[in-house]
């Protein structure tokens, strides 16, 4: 039976009580890889990335959590929230390590490659970099955006920062000088930024468009129109396909080379806010307004994680009911 005739059966990860607005995966480490979710319930959750099994909940924020990050080996987590703080956590014990005070909602957090710094973006229209080795020191400050920051990431071997904001721009900042060195202008506010697994391609969503840019030059590689306002997109580690989701509750998969739609299906019971491929590319995760995050197989019918490949005669028994992965 051809794998493409099989129905996509997601693993549904329950446990959050409000919309799930952002997701991040760690790299593959000794004990597999991990997934963290940001939710308006104020409690970011850590899970095993391949199964969705709940590991723990980071408790301490007093408001909606808008952005999350895991460092590469899943020893540290970060979260940005409506309580005006960006927090850094021990991802093994769940203990809070640092809490960096801001003057407005923190929408975005990300680690650098060495896990020595985090970058935050806030509704103050500012991008800051905090040194985790010297948490009391004044942060690096990048100002110039005229709208709230949506997302900010380290790039170009951590020498630069790329940020997207509600001013219809994506800007590149040089950390040596602290100044803006490049700017991309869009007809709509950019919703998401992702840097590909090999650090070569920047994926930006804006309006109903997904555009791909060479990270080292910010030269546009290609642009693909999607049938909905798209909130988030993720490029597969091998750069053959990308997935995206947005206002129409659907999950889409496109061929990156041709720009053609491969498949789309109703993924959630509410708008999709965040999508992300796992580090091995075997699955992608989505977070939605409906309060769930779901894991989807890149190749349907393959035995991986909690998905077991079965003979066609057994399919009705084993795969017909979507699998719930509860949080304790």
Image (cartoon, helix red, strand yellow):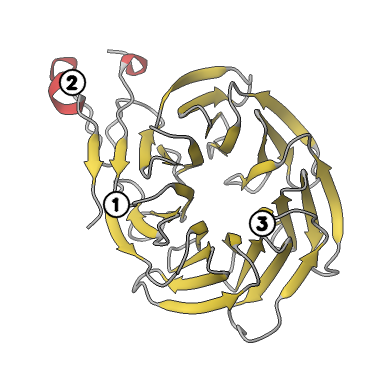
Is 90 above or below relative to 124? below
Residue 152 circle label: 3
- Where's the N terminus, which quadrant? top left
SS at badge 3: strand
Residues marked 2 and 1 touching at CB (< 8 Å): no
What residue sits 23% from the left and 28% below the top?
309
Residue 15 circle label: 1
Image coords of residue 127 (percent x, y): 71, 64
What residue sits 67% from the left and 25% below the top?
224
What residue sits 33% from the left and 46% below the top?
50
Nearest the eye: 20 or 277: 20
Is 160 above or below relative to 86? above
Q: Earlier in the sequence, mark 2 or mark 1?
A: 1
Is 310 above or below relative to 163? above
- Where's the C terminus, which quadrant? bottom left
Horizontal side of residue 4 vs 263, given as left or right: left
Image coords of residue 204 (percent x, y): 67, 40
State how far apart marks 3 and 1 are (Cα): 27 Å
SS at badge 1: loop
Nearest the eye: 148 or 245: 148
SS at badge 2: helix
Mark 1: few/some/many CA within 10 Å (<14, 14-19, 20+) = some
Horizontal side of residue 140 vs 193, given as left or right: right
What residue sits 45% from the left and 55% below the top?
40
Q: Quadrant of residue 135?
A: bottom right
Is 156 above or below relative to 277? below
Q: Quadrant of residue 112?
A: bottom right
What residue does disc 2 label? 315
Mark 3: few/some/many CA within 10 Å (<14, 14-19, 20+) = many
Image coords of residue 7 (percent x, y): 31, 20
Nearest the eye: 300 or 90: 90
State how far apart marks 2 and 1 are (Cα): 28 Å
């Amino acid at each position: 039976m051809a794998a493409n005739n099989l129905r996509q059966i997601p693993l549904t990860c329950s446990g959050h009580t409000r919309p799930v607005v952002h997701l991040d995966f760690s790299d593959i480490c000794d004990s597999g890889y991990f997934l963290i979710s940001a939710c308006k319930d104020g409690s970011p959750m850590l899970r095993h990335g391949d199964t969705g099994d709940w590991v723990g909940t980071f408790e301490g924020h007093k408001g909606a959590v808008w952005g999350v990050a895991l460092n590469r080996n899943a020893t540290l987590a970060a979260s940005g929230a409506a309580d005006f703080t960006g927090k850094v956590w021990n991802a093994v014990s769940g203990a809070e390590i640092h809490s960096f005070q801001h003057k407005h909602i923190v929408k975005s957090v990300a680690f650098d490659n060495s896990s020595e710094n985090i970058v935050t973006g806030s509704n103050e229209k500012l991008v800051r970099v905090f040194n985790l080795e010297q948490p009391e020191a004044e942060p690096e400050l990048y100002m110039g955006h005229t709208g709230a920051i949506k997302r900010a990431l380290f790039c170009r071997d951590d020498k630069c920062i790329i940020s997207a904001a509600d001013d219809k721009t994506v800007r590149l900042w040089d950390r040596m000088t602290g100044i803006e060195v490049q700017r991309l202008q869009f007809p709509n506010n950019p919703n998401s930024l992702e840097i590909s697994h090999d650090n070569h391609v920047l994926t930006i969503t804006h309006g109903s468009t997904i555009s791909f840019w060479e990270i080292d030059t910010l030269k546009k590689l290609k642009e693909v129109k999607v049938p909905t306002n798209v909130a988030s997109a993720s490029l597969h580690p091998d750069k053959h396909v990308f997935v995206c989701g947005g206002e129409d509750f659907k999950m889409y998969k496109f061929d990156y080379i041709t720009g053609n739609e491969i498949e789309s299906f109703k993924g959630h019971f509410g708008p999709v806010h965040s999508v992300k491929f796992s580090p091995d590319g075997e699955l992608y995760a989505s977070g939605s307004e409906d309060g769930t995050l779901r894991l989807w197989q890149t190749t349907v019918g393959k035995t991986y994680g909690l998905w077991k490949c079965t003979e066609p005669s057994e399919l009705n028994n084993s795969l017909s009911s979507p699998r719930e992965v509860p949080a304790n």
